[in-house]
């Protein structure tokens, strides 16, 4: 059991880092550009060093599509299908005895609370994983139809002209991209909660709109989602730039 748990924990952590990387690259660019649209002072400063900022945004964009490819492409070693497969093939690690053993190992006073805690624990079956796989299939179809060629034909191999690349971008939408990458974060959260806390693996709501997150006040405590933190940082960066223009 220990080896199976360690294997899943490893895949869970790799998946988290891949997803968070994609989110950070995407929302760093989108959050900063949204701030520029609202701030004439920030625009003036950025326009003084245009090549640097074009390079920065280009690097973020390229890194985003490469990260997205590692998550969805079947040839990637740690793609989203492998992540879910490892979970389903080792379904016994989500049993009540397995979870209780982990909780007891992490708590010196487990005898005081563990019995009550275990009464609400959810034990998954293969239907849960088939449901999650259905969501993955939905977003992979979107990725393969509108995003895969960026990695293969624009960044990995320069096969497309500038006109063809613009045509690829025209097939995408910001809202669709946001929902796709935040779905991946929701999936990670669902399986993390299942393994560590015995919660039913459902895709709980998360913020995905850059504009909504920019309007919110983010408290910097543990538990705030990575997309909210990076958007908050871009918002703070715009404020710092504005101060230099006063």
Image (cartoon, rainbow, N blue to C red):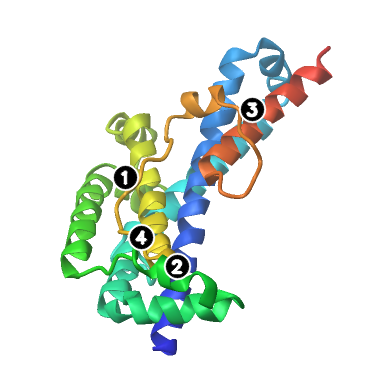
Q: Secondary structure at mark 3?
A: helix
Residue found at x 36% / y 67%: 76
Residue beneath disc 2: 196
Q: Residues within 10 Å of mark 2 (few under 14, many from 20)?
A: few
Residue 27 is situated, as x and y percent measured from the top left of the image, at 52, 37
Q: Which residue is mark 3?
A: 235
Q: Quadrant of residue 32?
A: top right
Query: In front: 23, or 77?
Result: 23
In the picture, the disc for residue 147 is 1
Viewer-closest of 68 and 10 = 10
**Residue that carries the numbered disc 4 in the rendered image:** 199
Q: Looking at the picture, does residue 104 appear above or below residue 61?
A: below
Q: Secondary structure at mark 4?
A: loop
Looking at the image, residue 90 sits to the left or right of residue 21; the answer is left
Q: Dot 1: what SS? A: loop
Residue 48 shows in this picture: yes
Residue 231 at x, y percent in the picture: 57, 34
Q: Earlier in the sequence, mark 3 or mark 2?
A: 2
Q: Earlier in the sequence, mark 4 or mark 3?
A: 4
Tell which circle, 1 or 2, labels the residue nearer the N-terminal end: 1
User: Dot 1, how many residues are within 10 Å of its Cα: few (below 14), some (14-19), or many (20+)?
Assistant: many
On residue 12, which mark appears? none
Q: Give the mark, 1 or 3, whose residue is nearer the N terminus.
A: 1
Front disc: 1 or 4: 4
Quadrant of the snapshot with the C terminus = top right
- Tag in front: 1 or 2: 2
Q: CA distance from mark 1 to mark 3?
A: 27 Å
Q: What count of labels does the image hold? A: 4
Few, some or many C-alpha atoms within 10 Å of disc 4 (few <14, some 14-19, many ≥20)?
some
Give the quarter of the figure containing the N terminus: bottom left
């Amino acid at each position: 059991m220990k080896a199976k748990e360690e294997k899943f924990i490893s895949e869970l952590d790799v998946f988290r880092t891949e997803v968070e990387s994609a989110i950070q690259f995407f929302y760093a660019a989108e959050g900063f550009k949204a701030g520029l649209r609202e701030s004439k002072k920030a625009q003036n400063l950025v326009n003084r060093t245009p090549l640097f900022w074009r390079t920065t945004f280009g690097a973020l964009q390229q890194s985003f599509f490469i990260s997205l490819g590692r998550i969805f492409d079947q040839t990637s070693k740690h793609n989203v299908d492998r992540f879910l497969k490892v979970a389903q093939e080792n379904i016994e690690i989500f049993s009540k005895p397995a979870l209780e053993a982990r909780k007891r190992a992490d708590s010196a006073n487990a005898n005081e609370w563990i019995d009550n805690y275990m009464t609400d624990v959810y034990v998954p079956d293969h239907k849960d994983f088939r449901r999650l796989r259905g969501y993955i299939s939905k977003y992979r179809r979107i990725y393969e139809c509108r995003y895969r060629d960026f990695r293969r034909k624009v960044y990995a191999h320069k096969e497309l002209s500038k006109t063809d690349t613009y045509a690829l971008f025209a097939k995408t939408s910001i809202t669709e991209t946001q929902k796709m990458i935040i779905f991946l974060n929701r999936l990670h959260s669902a399986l993390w909660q299942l393994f560590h806390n015995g919660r039913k693996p459902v895709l709980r709501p998360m913020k995905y709109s850059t504009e909504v997150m920019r309007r919110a006040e983010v408290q910097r405590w543990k538990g705030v989602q990575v997309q909210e933190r990076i958007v908050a940082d871009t918002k703070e960066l715009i404020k710092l730039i504005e101060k230099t223009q006063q």
